[in-house]
Image (cartoon, rainbow, N blue to C red):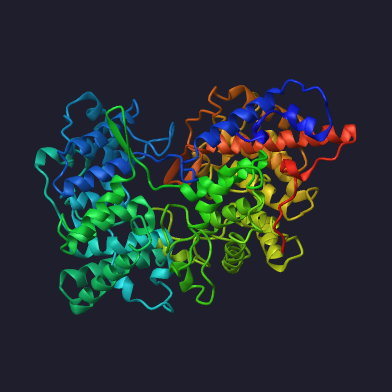
Amino acid sequence: MNALHTLPSQERQALGVRRTPLPASPTQRALDRARRRLLDLQRPDGHWCGELQGDTILESEYVLLMAFLGRECEERTGKVAEYVLRQQRPDGSWTHYPDGPIELSGSVKAYFALKLTGHDPDAPYMRRACEVIRANGGAAQCNSFTKFYLALLGQFPYANCASVPPELMLLPRWFYLNLYAMSSWTRTIVVPLSIFSAFKPVRHVPPERGVRELFLEPPETPMSPAPYGRRLFTWGNFFLAVDAVYKRAERWGLLGPIRNIAVAKAAAWMRERFTDSDGLGAIFPPMIYTVISLRCLGVADDAPEMRWALKQLEDLMIEEDGAIRLQPCFSPVWDTALALNALADAHVTTETDAAPQAAVDWLLEREVRRRGDWSVQNPHLEPGGWFFEYNNGFYPDTDDTAMVLMALARTGAANTPAAQPAGERGLRWLLGMQNRDGGWAAFDRDVTREVLTKVPFADHNAMLDPSCPDITARVLEALGCYGFGVDHPQVRRALAFLRKTQEKSGCWIGRWGVNYLYGCWQVLVGLQKIGFDMGDTMVRRAVAWLEQAQQPEGGWGESCGSYDDPSLAGKGTPTASQTAWALLALMAAGEGAGDAVRAGVAYLVATQAEDGDWREEPFTGTGFPKVFYLKYHLYSLYFPLMALARYQRRALQALSASEGVRLTPSLGLRACSARR
C-alpha cells in the first residue's frame, strides 16, 4: 500500500508540522478504514461495480417472461420467485422501496409470479396478498405495463390494454409526436413493446395458475378509461379517442401493409441497437421486451440472437441463500468515476498510486466514439462522453460524462497524452448537450414536450427527459474542474436555470437521487466549483434548509416518499450517503467549521462498521420518481469517504495555517490540474 494511505501524523511530519507523530483522530481512522475498504473492492482490471438493487418488479417480470416461454417450472425460476416471497411485507403487499406504501402493480406481478411457480393460493401469505390487492382496487387498476404482462399470459384482454402502435416508427422527425420526442429509456421500451403490441402473443396458463381472483370484476369486462378532467377537450381525452379509433382500425384490418412496414422498421431499429450494448439500452425493461419481441418475430429459442438476449438477463442475476435476485442494470462507469473522485479527495491520485491509473485506463477504453440516439437532435456534434453500464454505445449520458471528466481532472490524469483528447471531446459533447432552458438533461437535448405525458401508455412517469437541477449542477462542477467560471455564457444560462428551479424552502429537487438532499448537495458543490459567490441568498437559503433538516443524532435522511409528498423533504431514516451529501453541501458553502458539520462527521464516525463501510437499508437512488427507486450498494462507502476526506483536509489546512506551514501539492491538495 502506498505511503499516502497511512495516518495523518505521517502527513504532518512530511509537512514539518510535527516531529513526533500524534495518534490519529477518530475522523482520520474512519477515513483510513473507508479508503482501504474502497481500494479492496477494486476489480482486477481496475474498475469498481457495486450491486444495484431495485424492487421485486424485476424478479416478478422475469418469472412472467419465463412463464411465457414455458419455463416457469425450472429451478432457477423458482429461486427467483423465492426472492420475491422473501420481500413480501407482513400485510401481504410489495412496495417500491423499504417501508414504502403498497405498490399495486408490483404486488399483482409478485402474486402472479408466485402462483406460476407453484405457490398455494390458500397459503396464508398468498391470501393476505390477494386481500390487500383487492382492497386497493384489484388488478384492473394496474399500470399499462403490468396489463401487458397479464395479457401476455391470458389473464387480461389486449382490447383493454393501451395501444403501442409500431406505426410510430413511420412518423417523421418534424412531426410533433415522433419517436425521438420521447426519452431515450422510453424509446428503448416502446420500440420492442410496439412489436409485442402488434402481434399480441398469448400463452394461456392453466386456470389454477391464473389470477382472476385479483379482479373485482371479470377481466373481460370492457373498460372505458376515465376521461382526463371535466373539460371536453384535454390532451388526455384526445389520446384516448385516438387509441379507440386505432383499435378499431386494427380490428377491422385497415392498417394493411403499413403495419408490416412499421414492424419491420421497429425490428431493424431494435437490432441495430444490440451492437455495442449489453442488451437493448443495457437496462432491464427493454431486455425483457426484446425477448418477447424476438419470439413474436419468429426467432427460435435456441437461435444465437435469442440466446444472447436471454444471457443479458441472466448476467444480472445474483444468487444467495437459495434465492436469486436481479439487478436492473450494471453501474460500473458511474461507480468507477465516483470511486476515483473519492480517492482523489483522500489523496490517492494517479501521481501517487497505481490503483487510480488502472481505473483511468479502464474508463478511457469506454469512451463513446460512435453516434447514438442523442445525435438525432445534435447532428453536427462530435461523439464523446461515457455511459453508465459496461457497454451501451448508443446511450452516453451527461451525468456519467461529467463524473468521469471530474475524475480525470482530480486524479491528475486529465493532462496526460492518453486522457487529454478524450477529456476535450467529453467537454465539447457536454457543452453541446445543454438545453434551451439553460439546464442539462440526462440523455438527450430538449426532450420536453409535455403533451406526450398524456398518451395512454405514459403512466410510467418517464416519457420525457427534461433539464434537472442535479445534473445541471454536476455539469457545472465538471466545467469548474477545467477552468470554467461564472462569466462563461453557458454557465450563466445554467445559473439562471438553477435560480428558477430552487424551491421556496431553499432546496432543489433531485431527479436521480433521493431527493431534496441529493439536489441540494449537487447544486451547492457545483456552484462552489465555478467560483460562485457562496454568500449569495440562493446559497444561504439552501444552507438554512440543510441545517434545519439535520436530525438530533447528527445525520440526515430522506424517504423516497418525498417525491409523492414534498412535505417529507429532508425527512426520513438517517443514512450514511445522505448525511455525506449534506456535509459536502455545507462544506462547499463555507460551513466546514460549523456545528452542523461537526455533528454530521461525528455521526459518520460513530456509525461506521469495522470493515470500513457503512450499513444502510433505505433506497437513496432514483430511477423514475414515484415509480422506481434504487439502492446503490457503494453509495454508503464512497460518499462518506468524500465527506470525511474533505472535512479532514480542511482541518489540516486550519492546522497548517495556525502553525505557519504551507500545504504542498504532493499531498493531493492542489486544485484540479486540467485548465482551459
- Name the residue: 48% across, 33% down: 618
Q: Position of residue 30 (x, y in %)?
A: 63, 27
Q: Nearer the viewer, residue 585 or 341?
A: 341
- Name the residue: 51% across, 49% down: 334
The number of numbered discs placed on residues in the rendered structure image is 0
Q: Is residue 150 above or below residue 241?
A: above
Q: Is residue 228 visible?
A: no
Side of 360 relative to 662 (left or right): left
Q: Nearer the viewer, residue 154 or 594?
A: 594
Q: Nearer the viewer, residue 427 or 533?
A: 427
Quadrant of residue 642 in the image?
top right
Q: Position of residue 588 (x, y in %)?
A: 73, 44
Q: Is residue 24 above or below residue 229?
A: above
Q: Nearer the viewer, residue 275 or 87?
A: 275
Quadrant of residue 241 in the image?
bottom left
Q: Is residue 32 visible?
A: yes
Q: Position of residue 676 (x, y in %)?
A: 71, 64
User: Looking at the figure, which quarter contains the N terminus?
Assistant: top right
Side of 165 relative to 188 (left or right): left
Q: Position of residue 443 (x, y in %)?
A: 49, 61
Q: Is residue 466 above or below residue 116?
A: below
